[in-house]
Image (cartoon, rainbow, N blue to C red):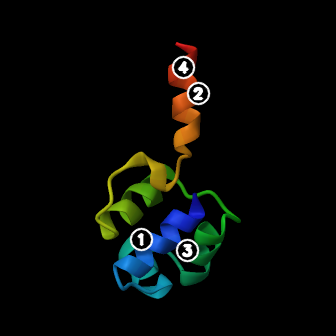
Amino acid sequence: MRKKLKKKRIENNLTQEDIAKEVGIHRAHYTNIELGKVNPSFKVIVKIKKVLDYYKDDLFFDSNVYNIHEKAN
């Protein structure tokens, strides 16, 4: 999951500092989000997705979880 976050950041030619500044968090906190060391709040997730211009849910949420849930129903 977090690999997708880094990949999208690089594709958009953004640094961790760029995203952190736009989102309103410290760069170190963003780095920890990207490394998977902390889980961002929903509010931060929405802001990061907006900065990256990426609105699919698979950026932070594993799509396999959705697939398993759909198969169970």
Residue at horizontal 52 percent and vertical 33 percent from the top: 66
Measure how far apart labels 2 and 4 are at the Cα level: 5 Å
Taking the image as shown, residue 60 lies to the left or right of residue 24, namely right
Q: Amino acid at mark 2?
A: Ile
With respect to residue 48, does 28 lie above or below? below
Mark 4 — residue? 71
Number of numbered tags placed on the structure image: 4
Helix, strand or loop at mark 4: helix
Helix, strand or loop at mark 1: helix
Q: Amino acid at mark 3?
A: Tyr
Q: Give residue 8's mark.
A: 1
- Of badges 4 and 3, nearer the viewer stands 4
The answer to whether marks 1 and 3 mark residues whose Cβ atoms lie closer than 8 Å is: no
Measure how far apart labels 4 and 3 are at the Cα level: 34 Å
Mark 3 — residue? 30
Position of residue 31 measured from the top left corner of the image (x, y, whole percent): 60, 77
Q: Give residue 66's mark.
A: none
Helix, strand or loop at mark 3: helix
Position of residue 57 measured from the top left corner of the image (x, y, whole percent): 42, 47
- Front-lying residue, 43 or 70: 70
**Of marks 1 and 2, which one's residue comes earlier in the chain?**
1
- Front-lying residue, 20 or 68: 68
Measure how far apart labels 1 and 2 are at the Cα level: 25 Å
Measure how far apart labels 1 and 4 are at the Cα level: 29 Å
